[in-house]
Amino acid sequence: MVASGITGHTRPTKVKKRAALQKRKRDDVDVEKLEQAVEQLDPNNGSYRHFTDLPLSDPTKQGLRSAHFAVMTDIQARALPLALKGHDILGAAKTGSGKTLAFVVPVLENLYRLQHVGVDAGLGALIISPTRELAIQIFDVLCKIGKHGHVFAAGLVIGGKSLEAERQALTRMNILVGTPGRILQHLSQTVAFNVDDLKMLVLDEADRILDMGFQRDVDAIVDYLPKERQTLLFSATQSRKLSDLARLSLQDPEYISVHAEDKSATPQTLQQNYIICPLEEKLDTLWSFIQASKKSKIICFFSSAKAVRFVYESFRHMQPGIPLLHIHGRQKQGQRFDTTAKFSAAKYSCLFATDVAARGLDFPAVDFVIQIDCPEDADTYIHRVGRTARYNRQGRGVLFLTPGEEEGMLKRLEAKNVPIERINVRQRKRQSVKDQLVHMLFKDPALKYLAQKAFITCVRSLSLQKDKDIFHLTEYDLEAYAASMGLPGTPRVKFLEEGNAKQKKQTSRDELAVSGSSGESEDGKDGPATKKGKLVRTKYDRMFERQNQDVLADHYKNLVRDDDAEEAPESEYNAYDDDDFLAVKRRIPARPDLSDIASEDDATATRMRKVVNLEGAAQPLIIDSNRREKLLKSKKKLLKLKDRGKKLVYDDDGNPHEVYELEDENDFRAKGLPEDQRQKFLQEAREVVQNADVEDKATAKAKKKEKIRKKKERETMEKEDDDNDSRVGLEDNEEDGLANFRADAEVSDVEADEMKRSKKWFQSDSEDEDESKKGKKGKKGKKGKKTGARQIVEEPETLEDMEALAAGLLG
Ligand SMILES: Nc1ncnc2c1ncn2[C@@H]1O[C@H](COP(=O)(O)OP(=O)(O)OP(=O)(O)O)[C@@H](O)[C@H]1O
């Protein structure tokens, strides 16, 4: 939140006072003239093409000029005259068509003409965005245009900062940009936050803000606002829902849909393709694609934060030769801001993202948008792919569809006028990353855990998808998918099992209902006791239903006997899980023979007994407490329970004998009394053990030290992972990788830069062969189609810098 800098008004010198008075007089004259000009504006006159054609204040004109905005885009030309005249607007235009300026300019202008400025005026305009990143971006545009002479105080409320600091600044704000949750928090908790005189409400990405996720927050915000106000709604995908208009109390809204007549709902400059790629081939395909596109700027969309993290962590360990970044909603705000700033500034980079980056974000010069996980609907597809080919620039989108998703998704895209063509992957150039992943997961349990979580979340999100025409869970090969992630087995998914269990339970209930309360199951064995026809679950029923992650110490796992798999009931229990909606099965460490499990009275039972036959132990081990259960995890403790063993000596025929059997009796007697010998032997053995113990301790200490060092290193890396991209071994790898894909022609750096957009990595092998026949000539042909020069990106500012900029608005 910005420090408003209003202190200048408290003790003005005479000179300052006079200057302020003169400025106000000038503004008054200016405002009057502007009011007249705006009144004369004809919104239906299609001849307004430049910003200078509109009656705008000098500060705004100067802001636009300095940002090099001269010619208006279609949505700006249509929306600005209406918005300046105070109409409510519902604006829809393709992604990257300049909707931000279509509301930022009217906000500045309308408040300026109303002279809604200064601490006493209160909040004049509220701009709501669905994500923090987008809010920051809007705020940035507002600052860029408004910093040349406007004197509004503008602020950003997106969370991640102390409420108290925001509270103090909020009371001085004239224009506020924010996310629904935080805005509502202030409206309900900050007493001095006055919105009674609000003049404008803007909803960017309105369809998202008005949908289910934000519905309650937005309705509550609107309740605080005055009904008499101007409301502007903008989005790339927008359906006119009467209920939404009523919720926002729009008054005779103007519908502007500039591209409604177009054949395509996506930009003309966008080339859109899809490939058929089963789940288990996605990682190989993505890796190979990245290898072939190191000189590109790429965004890859996934359906979950876990998937983003897993792919980011594993790929960066494999040294892809291109800086990798990742962004998802579970990161801290600072990290997210850094990532967007880094990706904006990068020339070549690959950003792994969830849909938190799907809407509104304006990254310069993105070459490819790859949708690894199928989007939930066509609108999400449009927003994601819209991160490339912005404002007349070229761009490519590639959608990965599994065979089962193809038909349903294509139908949805067709209905939304999205032209998309199928292409093939060059099978010959696809590299398998499975072995590397297996190796990495084996060495790094944290990565394995991440892979398991990513797998589970993926399955969950597939099964929860609403559009069942696209997503059929039964059609995915989950085992193969888990294997492709390098996992040694397919994690058990509680969600699915519960579904099955419910089904089974229902069936058995039905059966019980038929057989009455006899307490006998269909196969004749004793079934669970029933009370009034209801199933009564025993303690161990419950225990076996519990779930846990499959992260076990190796020795713990070794205790599980192979034959258990068939005979033992699946036992799972919840030791930990941050989202226990789904979990991975964890087996209990030894076969619990049901006959050995004595379950006490269900109501009072607090413990369960089980008997484990330890190899070499004289007695079976009874596990009847958590402490004893822990015994199973400690090799050292288990050793104590086992027989100590005997020393045997083998004769020439290979038969074992106790040592004394092979010794001559006279020799034995000559050595002294048996008890003395025993003591002597024990003494020697003790010394050997003590010496070994010292060595062992030293080794253990060294190991522990190494472990701590590695842990610290990992923690530092984890801490840094969001700050640092993983540009590792770029030079080394690049040569090999590119040699693979561009063997036939050497290109200069400039040519490579120009050629990258037309590089056809996704194409069939036959096309590939055709192309290689054409040779260099064909390649040169392609080069002609290339796009213009890259935009030069300014060094990104920090969030604090941007907020400080807003202070500049105060003049
Ligand atoms: N009149 C203009 N002249 C030149 N460039 C412009 C103009 N208007 C907008 N742009 C540029 O076009 C790009 C896209 O603009 P903007 O982010 O406002 O698009 P959008 O329609 O809001 O996209 P989305 O639907 O993805 O949110 C930005 O980089 C912006 O600077």
Image (cartoon, rainbow, N blue to C red):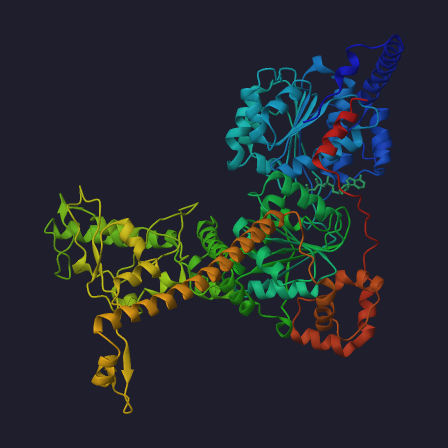
Of the pair 701 and 412, the residue shown nearer to us: 701
Q: In the displayed structure, does residue 472 sit left or right of residue 674?
A: right
Q: Residue at x 80, y 28 (%)?
A: 147
Q: Is residue 458 visible?
A: yes
> Residue 103's quadrant in the figure?
top right
Q: Residue at x 38, y 51 (%)?
A: 495
> Residue 676's quadrant in the figure?
bottom left
Q: In the displayed structure, does residue 309 sit left or right of residue 689?
A: right
Q: Where in the image, quadrant-wise, is ligand 1 located?
A: top right
Farthest residue to the bottom: give it. 653
Q: Is residue 251 visible?
A: no
Of the pair 791 and 733, the residue shown nearer to us: 733
Image position, residue 81 (x, y; %): 77, 29
Q: In the displayed structure, does residue 129 sit left or right of residue 778?
A: left
Image position, residue 219 (x, y; %): 53, 27
Image position, residue 91 (x, y; %): 67, 35
Q: Residue at x 68, y 51 (%)?
A: 263
**Quadrant of the drawing holding the N terminus:** top right
Image position, residue 574 (x, y; %): 35, 49
Q: How many marks overall?
A: 0
Q: Residue at x 50, y 59 (%)?
A: 703
